[in-house]
Image: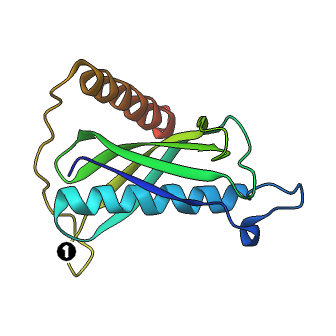
């Protein structure tokens, strides 16, 4: 499975001091959806290696319907780059708004935490190809930023 969407209601237990869903809760949901997507693809346990480019566009209100969509964007030898988009909205209005987005890298591991190969993902649609290219560019930029200058 190369994508998964989790849906649920934003509960009062997730409220922050401003009366909206806490950003840390949104990040937890993102990690859970990413894990489900990565594990479904790899068919084994996966660990989060990197979360980058997280962007909070709009707050999520308590009582909103929330969708967290995780889509496989690109695979390396042992890693999976997963694009996650969070949308929310009032169920009475029926309109969902993008609230948060980011890219997560998961690594498939064995019982000792050693990386294991994953099946390569081959984008099949123009949208999947564009997403794969965006993931590669983001990954290259993150690597360049992490590499110390000589």
Residue beneath label 1, please?
A: 110
Residue 49 visible in the snapshot: no
Which one is in front, 42 or 125?
Answer: 125
- Dot 1, how many residues are within 10 Å of its Cα: few (below 14), some (14-19), or many (20+)? few
Residue 52 visible in the snapshot: yes
* Color encoding of the figure: rainbow
Q: Secondary structure at mark 1?
A: loop
Q: Is residue 148 left or right of residue 125?
A: right
Residue 140: where, in percent of width, then height? 38, 30
Q: Is residue 89 left or right of residue 105?
A: right
Q: Residue sitting at 23 percent across and 69 percent down?
A: 109
Q: Residue sitting at 72 percent across and 67 percent down?
A: 14
Which one is in front, 77 or 72?
Answer: 72
Q: Is residue 114 left or right of residue 97?
A: left
Q: Residue sitting at 62 percent across and 56 percent down?
A: 26
Residue 101: where, in percent of width, then height? 54, 39
Q: What is the residue that sits farthest to the front in this orientation?
A: 92
Residue 32: where, in percent of width, then height? 45, 63
Q: What is the residue that sits farthest to the bottom in this orientation?
A: 111
Residue 89: where, in percent of width, then height? 64, 43
Q: Is residue 80 left or right of residue 143?
A: left
Residue 88, picture quadrant: top right
Which one is in front, 145 or 86?
Answer: 86
Q: How many marks?
A: 1
Q: Residue sitting at 13 percent across and 34 percent down?
A: 122
């Amino acid at each position: 499975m190369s994508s998964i969407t989790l849906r649920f209601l934003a509960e009062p237990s997730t409220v922050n001091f401003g009366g909206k869903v806490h950003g840390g809760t949104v990040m937890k949901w993102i990690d859970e959806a990413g894990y489900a997507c990565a594990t479904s693809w790899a068919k084994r346990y996966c660990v989060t290696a990197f979360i980058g480019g997280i962007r909070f566009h709009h707050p999520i209100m308590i009582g909103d319907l929330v969708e967290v969509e995780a889509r496989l964007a690109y695979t390396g030898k042992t890693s999976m780059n997963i694009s996650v988009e969070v949308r929310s909205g009032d169920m009475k209005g029926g309109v969902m708004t993008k609230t948060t987005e980011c890219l997560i890298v998961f690594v498939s591991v064995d019982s000792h935490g050693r990386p294991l190969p994953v099946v390569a993902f081959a984008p099949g649609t123009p949208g999947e190809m564009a997403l794969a290219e965006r993931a590669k560019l983001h990954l290259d930029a993150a690597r360049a930023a992490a590499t110390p200058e000589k």
